[in-house]
Every structure is written in structure tokens, then in C-alpha cells.
Image (spheres, rainbow, N blue to C red):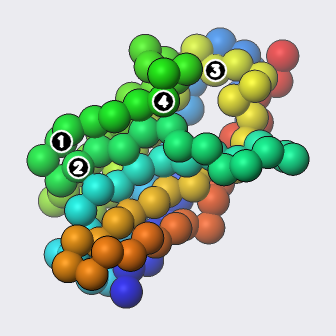
Amino acid sequence: QVQLVESGGGLVQAGGSLRLSCAASGSIFSIGTMGWYRQAPGKQREFLATVTRGGTTNYLDSVKGRFTISRDNAKNTVYLQMDSLKPEDTAVYYCNAVTVLVTKNYWGQGTQVTVSS
């Protein structure tokens, strides 16, 4: 089992920045790719970015250049640096981890990000 705990959400003005963190615990040796997703009210959860254990990243096109995902394997933590935030970035942001021995998805509880105009 893997537990994920997000932090760092909050209220920010448009153009501002936030840094989300997600700390993993439990069977951390089994974690492969970690990532961030978000879900706005009335919309489906959408992929934002992933990072492999080796540091290879992948991004949703619309956040490239504004969001940066990083990972500290020693701290079992993944980060999402969000710059130039827009009101349409308002959503609940979720951390995700995929285990490699037996492929399984784990999710954090989510952290609210609200961007005011």
C-alpha cells in the first residue's frame, strides 16, 4: 500500500505562483511514475504532468512552460511548481503514484487551488 499526502494549495491572485508537494509513504520502493492531476467543478479529472523515478517528465501541452514537476526520491516527494497562474487553473489538485511490481494507481486526498482574477 502507498499513502500520498498533498500540501501547498491555497488562494492566489492571477499571475501568482504556488508550489504543491506530495509526500509518499508505505511501500515506496514499489513506486514508479508519480504525477499530478486536477479536477475543476463539473469537469473530469485531467492529467497535468508525470515524472518517472529516473526524472523523465511529461506535461499537458497547456501547462508547459508554466508548471514544473520535480521529484526528490530521497524524500519520497513529488512537487508541482505552478507559475503564471490563471483563474482557469482553479481546481482540486491530486497527486498520483503508480506502482511497478503490481501495477496499481494510488491517489492523494487532493488540495484546493483557487486563482482569483
x and y percentages locating residue 5 in the rendered image: 50, 66
Q: Which residue is denoted by mark 2 in the rendering? A: 52
The answer to whether residue 88 is above or below residue 29 is above
Other-residue count near label 4 (Cα within 10 Å), few / some / many at <14 / 14–19 / ≥20 = few
Q: Nearer the viewer, residue 36 or 12?
A: 36
Q: Quadrant of the C terminus?
A: top right
Q: Secondary structure at mark 4?
A: loop
* Comes first in the chain, label 4 or label 1: 1
Q: Which residue is denoted by mark 3 in the rendering? A: 85
Q: Which residue is denoted by mark 4 in the rendering? A: 60
Query: Of all residues shown, which one is farthest toward the left?
Result: 54
Q: What residue is at 55 percent from the left and 32 percent from the top?
A: 18
Q: Nearer the viewer, mark 2 or mark 3?
A: 2
Other-residue count near label 1 (Cα within 10 Å), few / some / many at <14 / 14–19 / ≥20 = some
| Residue 76 can be seen in this image | yes
* Comes first in the chain, label 2 or label 4: 2
Q: Are marks 2 and 3 in contact (CB under 8 Å)?
A: no
Q: Amino acid at mark 4?
A: Leu
- Measured in 3D between alpha carbons, the distance from the residue under mark 4 to the one under mark 1, in whole angstroms, is 17 Å
- Measured in 3D between alpha carbons, the distance from the residue under mark 1 to the one under mark 2, in whole angstroms, is 5 Å
Write down the quadrant of residue 55 in the picture: top left
Q: Nearer the viewer, mark 4 or mark 1?
A: 4
x and y percentages locating residue 40 in the rendered image: 77, 43
Tell me the number on the disc at residue 55.
1
Q: Amino acid at mark 1?
A: Gly
* Comes first in the chain, label 1 or label 3: 1
